[in-house]
Image (tube, rainbow, N blue to C red):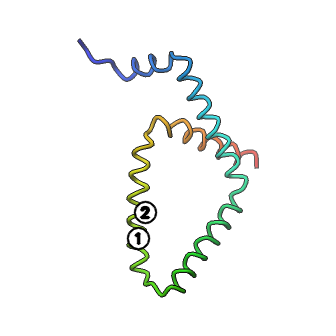
Amino acid sequence: MAEPTIGELLSSLLSQPSTLAVIAIQFFLGLALGYISIKILKYIVAFLAIIILGTFLSIWSLGLTPTEVLSTFGIAAETIKRLAVVMGLLSVGPVSVGFVVGIVVGLIKK
């Protein structure tokens, strides 16, 4: 028995109405997220700058060295990488594609 090709797998997967509905909803959620994100980009950048500045001020007030702080970032990065693997490409794919399309639409409509 021959193994199915990727095209056959995709066609059988996309022939199910519930799967198509989920992929469409995820795509439009990503589209909305990208469009809204590009519209509020300056606020997001200001928010992140304030958070980073506040974090460094807190670290400085505790008397920690930059080396100690960077070692904890390595642990956080490893945890985020494991979480991304758990999420999987099927759940993140349509939202990511929609997000990129939303950013493009937001930039064009600016």
Position above or below: 87 against 75: above
Q: Report which quarter residue 54 is drawn in.
A: bottom right
Q: Are marks 2 and 1 in contact (CB under 8 Å)?
A: yes
Q: CA distance from mark 2 to mark 1?
A: 6 Å
Residue type for callout 1: Thr
Horizontally, residue 56 falls left or right of residue 77, namely right
User: Residue at 49% across / 37% down in the picture?
Assistant: 91
From the viewer's side, name the closer residue of 40 and 79: 79
User: Callout 2: 10 Å neighbours few (<14), some, many (20+)?
Assistant: few
Query: Residue 103: where, in percent of width, then height?
Result: 65, 46
- In the shown orientation, is residue 13 left or right of residue 4? right
Residue at figure coordinates x 75%, y 45% from the top left: 109
74 lies above or below 14: below
Residue at the image position 55 percent from the left and 21 percent from the top: 18
Q: Which mark is residue 76?
A: 2
The amino acid marked with disc number 2 is: Ala
| Residue position marked by numbered label 1 in the rendering | 72
Give the image quarter of residue 105.
top right
Residue 61 left/right relative to 6: right
Residue drawn where x is 60% and y is 43% of the image: 99
Up/down of 8 relative to 29, above or below = above
